[in-house]
Image: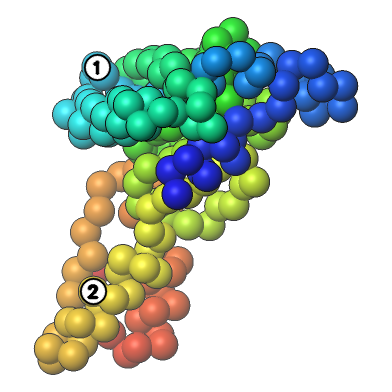
Amino acid sequence: MTTAMLLAGCGSKASQTDAASAESCVDTSGPTIKVGSLNSLSGTMAISEVTVRDAIKLAVDEINASGGVLGKQIELIGEDGASEPTVFAEKAEKLISSDCVAAVFGGWTSSSRKAMLPVFESANSLLYYPVQYEGLESSKNIFYTGATTNQQIVPALDYLKGRGVKSLYLVGSDYVFPADREPHHQGLRRSQRHRDQG
């Protein structure tokens, strides 16, 4: 499965001539395939994202120890998003245009993903986004691996309703996920007759 996902992002050989690959510097014709790891290794999100970077490195080490992908070793190129969406966008551009990676694994916050989205779309490159998100977004250039609000909040509310809970608070910080999940939650309150206190 991991191999198939990686190959989906491997792009084209640099020698191919169609318009999409002419803009890409990705070259999978050699003995290695470059992939990027873009996580916050500094700043407020480092406490969450360093473990993701470590998991990516572990996966690459295990794949390489098993013979690689179609006999090619994976070369991991890491960058620090520094817990800042604009830095994520800049580092994504570097990984795609300068380091010529076939795919990037990373991001954590919705704001980092949203900042990177136009970079990946304009370069027709692939981002594997590793965590839950608010939904309401779809791109052929992002492989969303986490659950959306209807896969997280709805089951929790169903469970609580089954336990007799008739009112509740959904509390969130002031950022993308809580703000964007609110329209989903409003519709759910109407359909399931939950009484929300705030």
Disc 1 secondary structure class: loop
Q: Position of residue 165 (x, y in %)?
A: 14, 86
Q: Position of residue 87 (x, y in %)?
A: 44, 17
Q: Residue at x 45, y 22 (%)?
A: 74
Nearest the eye: 134 or 60: 60
Q: Residue at x 36, y 68 (%)?
A: 151
Disc 2 secondary structure class: helix
Quickly name the residue at label 1: 42
Quickly name the residue at label 2: 156
Quadrant where the C terminus lies? bottom left
State which quadrant residue 17 falls in: top right
Does any portion of residue 111 appear in the rendered image? Answer: yes
* Disc 2 to disc 1: CB gap under 8 Å: no
Nearest the eye: 53 or 149: 53
Does any portion of residue 179 appear in the rendered image? Answer: no
Instruction: Indicate left or right for 32 with 46 as reference.
Output: right
Q: Position of residue 197 (x, y in %)?
A: 21, 74
**Mark on residue 23?**
none
Instruction: Indicate left or right for 162 with 8 as reference.
Output: left
**Type of amino acid under label 1:** Ser
Q: Is residue 192 above or below residue 71?
A: below
Q: Residue at x 23, y 65 (%)?
A: 170
Q: Residue at x 23, y 74 (%)?
A: 156
Q: How many marks?
A: 2
